[in-house]
Image (cartoon, rainbow, N blue to C red):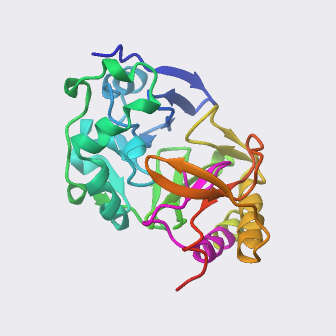
Amino acid sequence: MINSEFKTERVSAHITRIFAFSTELMYLVEGEKRAALLDSGSGIGFVKPLIDRLTDKPLDVLLTHGHVDHAMGASEFPTDTVYINQEDAYIYEKHCTWEFRKSGLWMMSGGDRVTEEDFTPVVPITDWHDLKEGDCFDLGGISVEIYACPGHTRGSVVMLLPEERTVLLGDACNSFTFLFQDYSTTVEEYRESLCRLRKKLDGRCDKVLASHGDGVLSTEVISDNIHVCEQILAGEAGGFPMEFGGDQGLRALEKVRPGHGNIVYNPAQIYRG
């Protein structure tokens, strides 16, 4: 079994970053009356005891999308406190299996020590509340607003904390955005999602939280990825082969600039079809 002590760091007076075991990050947001856990990690080790130590306020668990490294820890919490866009049922149902979860252990330091007992149980996604654009969670003095951003998955959402002028993008937009799996949208549709999102967030945030790496992204990352989409659509992007988990894609930009946008795309999924 693994040593399941999660590392944490303070982002602000209201936000705590939690480092999980497969490169993913979670965020605990605490208001005056309630708290929210933004993403729940891969369900390797048990994060609920840590959350119980950090806050005694009523808690909601809000998931950016249905991938294994964001949603699988949610089963530790009461089902009526968990929210996810049900559009991602198609991917969650694949990722929640023991076989799939075990297949990803190569990404984790010490993954060879993980046993089935280290994994959280599986809860059907339909047991959780649907999470949609327009939903807002008032925690008391700080709130979490939900915005749709389909692309990486069809049900991907981002979460704005307007009082903190901070947005969590999940995997919807980052410096290595995966858009090449067969369940992702086309590049054309993704660009439209990003343009809508940029317009809605305009002037409302000046800090961007990431779900991987050091947790920090440039405030220009959405505009960066819109530009990368336009390069792909115009046939001007690079085609640098990349493989991940058996899936093949093309990296649009050869060099990854820390915190800035880049996209891994499927040449068969560029235009709306």
Give the percent coordinates (x, y) of residue 163.
64, 48
Residue in front for this viewpoint, 104 or 125? 104
Residue in front for this viewpoint, 214 or 54? 214
Residue in front for this viewpoint, 42 or 242? 242
Question: Can I make out residue 66 in this image?
Answer: yes
Residue found at x 47% / y 61%? 181
Magenta stretch encompasses residue 183: yes
Depicted 260 relative to depicted 102: above or below: below
Give the percent coordinates (x, y) of residue 226.
73, 66
What is the quadrant of the N terminus in the image? Answer: top left
Question: Can I make out residue 203 in this image?
Answer: no
The answer to whether 268 appears left or right of 69 in the picture is right
Give the percent coordinates (x, y) of residue 105.
37, 31
The answer to whether 267 appears left or right of 255 in the picture is left
Query: Quadrant of residue 271 in the image?
Result: bottom right
Residue found at x 21% / y 28%? 116
Residue found at x 42% / y 31%? 106
The answer to whether 73 appears left or right of 141 in the picture is left
Query: Quadrant of residue 57 in the image?
Result: top left
The answer to whether 14 appears left or right of 175 in the picture is left
**Furthest-bottom residue in this view:** 273
Give the extent of the magenta segment. 171-195
How many marks are shown on the rendered structure? 0
Give the percent coordinates (x, y) of residue 15.
56, 34
